[in-house]
């Protein structure tokens, strides 16, 4: 059974102050109301919690046990409520943010550090994943908001997007690429659908959605018989597979910009422009953001604008 929580609160203050009068003062009620609540709690439990000796209250063994249980909860509740109320005036508390895996790993730690230099009472929890993982977490309230790239799994999540406010923030070029050695051996300048569809590929998902979307954008066609030599859920693992001449993969240009300039990785282009993946700020529709969320989102947008990321990672 769970005793009446109002009476538990009265009991805590009586035990803590060892005085009905002081407890009444802290609770801003009459001493008579304190005594009545205490009597009703003892009746509810069928146990005496104090021995009355003149004007003194001596805790019984049951009273001491109950206080041991109640005190940590009450104190944590007091501190927690104070923190919640403080967050109305000063950015503070926990922010839960979702992000694409590689982008989150490379960008957000520095962003968090810069933000905490101004608002040291804010702490972060970050979830890294693709839209099929992050969108349900945003929708269920497990994340306050997220940066989500829709391109990689667009076909799988498009039906769920109506629940969200989606604000594009960053343009990311998505390219098909391979190593210099693989290009010389297998591609040899032939970027036709007929040639590319026969080559080896490194895929993110078993369904090959990333590859499917790339082929659809560039050729409006997709081969169901692509030779997928490795399937892995890490962007960096795809890049490493490319560098080891394992095959071709769809990757974000900005992550391998230096490697492309050095000639180690070769982008495979067509007459169509490269795919632009929009990394968007996603929030649940109707959700009222806290002061901490609004402050961080403003900080984030300003950093993206100043860094030039809103114009792409070219």
Image (cartoon, rainbow, N blue to C red):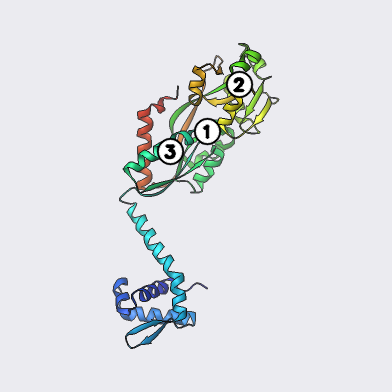
Q: Earlier in the sequence, mark 2 or mark 1?
A: 1
Residue 153: in sight, yes or no?
A: yes
Residue at x 41%, y 62% (from the top left corner): 76
Is 268 placed left or right of 125 in the picture? right
Vertical arrangement, residue 256 with respect to residue 67, above or below: above
Query: Element at badge 1?
Result: loop
Residue at mark 3: 109
Local SS, label 3:
helix
- Which mark is nearer the camera, 3 or 2? 3
- Name the residue rendered at 49%, 17% in the picture: 261
Farthest residue in the top direction? 189
Few, some or many C-alpha atoms within 10 Å of disc 3 (few <14, some 14-19, many ≥20)? few
For marks 1 and 3, give the CA distance: 22 Å
Q: Pinpoint residue 279: horizontal percent, then vertical percent.
A: 47, 32
Judged left or right of residue 206, residue 20 is left
Determine the image quadrant of residue 119. Answer: top left
**Where, quadrant-wise, is the C terminus in this rendering?**
top left
Q: CA distance from mark 3 to mark 2?
A: 38 Å
Where is residue 3? Give x, y as percent.
47, 74
Q: Which of the numbered marks, if any, corresponds to residue 150?
A: 1
Label whose residue precedes the other's in the sequence (3 or 2): 3
| Nearer to me, 261 or 98 | 261
Image position of 107 with respect to 222: above or below? below
- Looking at the picture, tell me which residue is in the foreground, 304 or 186: 186
As drawn, 141 above or below 111: below
Give the Cα distance between marks 2 and 1: 19 Å
> Where does label 2 land, which residue?
220
């Amino acid at each position: 059974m769970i005793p009446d929580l109002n009476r538990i609160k009265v009991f805590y203050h009586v035990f803590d102050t060892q005085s009905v009068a002081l407890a009444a003062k802290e609770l801003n009620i009459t001493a008579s109301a304190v005594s009545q609540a205490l009597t009703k709690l003892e009746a509810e439990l069928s146990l005496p919690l104090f021995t009355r000796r003149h004007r003194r209250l001596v805790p019984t063994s049951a009273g001491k046990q109950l206080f041991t249980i109640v005190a940590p909860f009450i104190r944590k509740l007091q501190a927690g409520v104070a923190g919640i109320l403080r967050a109305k005036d000063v950015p503070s508390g926990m922010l839960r943010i979702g992000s694409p895996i590689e982008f989150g790993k490379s960008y957000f730690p520095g962003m968090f550090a810069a933000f905490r230099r101004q608002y040291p009472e804010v702490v972060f929890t970050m979830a890294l994943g693709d839209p099929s993982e992050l969108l349900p977490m945003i929708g269920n309230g497990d994340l306050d908001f997220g940066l989500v790239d829709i391109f990689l799994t667009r076909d799988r999540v498009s039906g769920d997007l109506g629940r969200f406010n989606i604000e594009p923030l960053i343009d990311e070029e998505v390219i098909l690429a391979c190593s210099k050695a693989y290009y010389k051996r297998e591609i040899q300048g032939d970027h036709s659908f007929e040639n590319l569809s026969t080559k080896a590929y490194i895929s993110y998902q078993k369904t090959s959605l990333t590859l499917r979307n790339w082929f659809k954008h560039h050729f409006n066609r997709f081969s169901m018989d692509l030779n997928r030599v490795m399937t892995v859920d890490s962007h960096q693992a795809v890049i490493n597979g490319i560098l080891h001449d394992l095959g071709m993969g769809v990757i974000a240009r900005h992550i391998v910009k230096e490697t492309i300039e050095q000639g180690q990785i070769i982008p495979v282009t067509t007459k169509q422009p490269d795919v632009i993946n929009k990394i968007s700020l996603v929030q649940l529709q109707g959700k009222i953001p806290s002061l901490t969320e609004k402050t961080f989102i403003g900080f984030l947008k300003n950093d993206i604008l100043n860094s030039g990321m809103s114009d792409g990672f070219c």
